[in-house]
Amino acid sequence: MKRHSFVKKYDFWGWFFIAPASLMIFILSFYPMIQAFILSLQTGLGNNLRFTGIWNYYRLFQDEIFLSSVANVFIYLIFQVPIMLFMALILASILNNEKLKFKGLFRTLVFLPCATALVSSAMIFKTFFSVDGIVNFILLHIGIITSPVSWLTHPFWAKVVIIMVITWRWTGYNTIFYLAGLQNIDTSIYEAARIDGASAFQQFFKITLPLLRPVILLTTIMSTNGTLQLFDEVKNITSGGPGNATITISQYIYNLSFVYNPQFGYAAAVSYTILIMVALLSFIQMKVGDKA
């Protein structure tokens, strides 16, 4: 009887302590999501909305700008995420080397791009790749190009610049995760492998990669999530141009809400496509990660 009373008291205080946080999460996260879903079922301009069911979701498949934004985001995702994560893994392996001097300095330098303001770094890269920027100056000086290239107004090169900027900014961030993972691997495993004659290549693929799999899965999901919601870099460097060659889904939502005639219902429907894609890709990655 006494034990039963203690358990009830324990449960009560447990719920008492988590209730405020749960309430805040519901109010700040789940309630807006529910409201956004209800909004996505309405059509109209500004506040003049009427319920139209799933019409906004049907409209998505006929919207060329939306389809372009999805294609652009997947191009960024397919090329940028693997390159960034591979570079982060290499950098983490180098920074984890016991013989490396000035580790603190190098780790700070690697993480520094992530600490830079998004708008500032985007504007700096925009200056670098302008027609009279330093990139054209260097390439002209060493003879790789014969006339200045308009990098940011070319559909292909504008995407390349955006991929470079994202990679520059977020590689250091992922490096820190890999570095933490590497430091949790027992060094005796590597010593035993060296005694058995394993090369550095074999140690990397047979020991490091398998033991880092949870961290790799985590960074892959986070990077996928971040790329699907990409906004700041594209908005500040190309503003989605030329045409809609670099527009992202998040920027399209912004345009629907604040640039074009406000279509909040349709913008909410586009927002939910990001949620569905993030959930679907995360599920696939977790399943693949579990089987690997």
Image: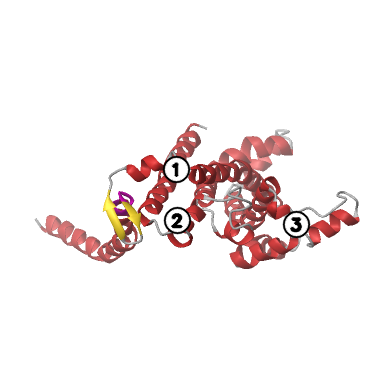
Q: What residue type is labelled 3?
A: Leu
Between disc 3 and disc 1, the foreground one is 1
Q: Which amino acid does label 2 sit on?
A: Leu
Where is residue 116 drawn, in percent x and y?
Answer: 62, 67
Q: Main secondary structure of the magenta part?
A: helix
**Residue closest to the eye, 147 or 143:** 147
Res. 246 visible in picture: yes
Q: Mark 2 points at which residue?
A: 256
Quarter of the picture holding the N terminus: bottom left
Q: Which of marks 2 and 1 is nearer the N terminus?
A: 2
Image-quadrant location for residue 109: bottom right
Q: Which of marks 3 and 1 is nearer the N terminus?
A: 3
Range covered by the magenta-colored residues: 38-42
Q: Name the residue under label 3.
A: 100
Q: How crowded is mark 2: few (under 14 residues within 10 Å), some or many (20 or more)?
A: some
Left or right, residue 201 beside residue 286: right
Q: What residue type is labelled 1?
A: Met
Q: Mark 1 points at which residue?
A: 277
Res. 195 visible in picture: no
Left or right, residue 15 beside residue 29: left
Q: How far is the residue under mark 2 from the one under mark 3?
A: 51 Å
Q: Is residue 39 magenta?
A: yes
